[in-house]
Amino acid sequence: MDIEERRHYRKRASRITGFAHFFGILAIILLLVWLLHYREGIEYDSTNFFRVFNWLVGFFTYMAGIASESTRMRMSPWHISGGRALLYMSICAALTGLMEKYTFTRMNHLVKYGEGSLMNFAGLSILLFGVFVDLSVGLAHYV
């Protein structure tokens, strides 16, 4: 593959990455509006310390350069495939959580005007964010 072909793929992936950023930011804004306006605040409490540990191991292995270049090259396809699978699993979990929360609030007659539309747009933006992130990863050619 020559240099011109590599530039072509990088341009296409970077354009799609722009869409991914847009839908990611849109999803975060819509979820914040939903939490602050309709649910009166953000409630976050996590006691899972393994989540932070796994993130630190991945950060030091790939970003800080502790692992050798050959190890990173061998693990790169597995890392990319696993990351794409985790991306879609997290999207499914987020959309299922939105649907479950809306169903629960609707059954208990706690739904406010416009909340359903906001949750639908938030769910759609989460899905489109995941699709564009996956497309940008799939179209990028790592040298």
Image (cartoon, rainbow, N blue to C red):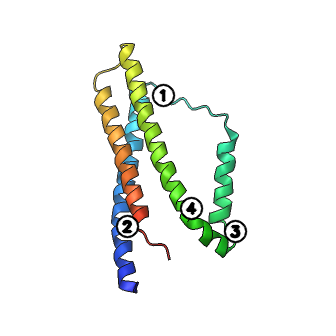
Disc 3/disc 1 C-alpha distance (Å)? 42 Å
- Residue under pointer 3: 67
Q: Dot 3: what SS?
A: loop
Point out the tag, 4 or 3, that comes first from the N-terminus.
Answer: 3
Q: Quadrant of the N terminus?
A: bottom left
Disc 4/disc 3 C-alpha distance (Å)? 15 Å
- Badge 1 crowding class, 10 Å Cα cut-off, few under 14, some 14 to 19, many 20 or more, is few
The amino acid on which the numbered mark 3 sits, given as a three-letter code, is Ala
The amino acid on which the numbered mark 1 sits, given as a three-letter code, is Gly
- Residue under pointer 1: 41
User: Picture coordinates of residue 137 (x, y %)?
Assistant: 43, 62
User: Picture coordinates of residue 47 (x, y %)?
Assistant: 67, 34
15 vs 45, left or right, is left
User: For the residues carrying marks 3 and 1, which lies nearer the camera in this image?
Assistant: 3
Residue 30 bears which disc, if any?
Answer: none
Disc 1/disc 2 C-alpha distance (Å)? 37 Å
139 vs 56, left or right, is left
- Residue under pointer 2: 13
Is residue 110 in view?
no
Image vertical order of residue 119 relative to residue 23, above or below: above
Q: Tell me the quarter of the picture where residue 100 sits.
A: top left
The amino acid on which the numbered mark 2 sits, given as a three-letter code, is Ala
- Badge 2 crowding class, 10 Å Cα cut-off, few under 14, some 14 to 19, many 20 or more, is many
Q: Dot 2: what SS?
A: helix
Q: Dot 1: what SS?
A: loop
Q: Tell me the quarter of the picture where residue 108 sits.
A: top left
Point out the tag, 1 or 4, that comes first from the N-terminus.
Answer: 1
Residue 78 bears which disc, if any?
Answer: 4
User: Picture coordinates of residue 14 (x, y %)?
Assistant: 37, 67
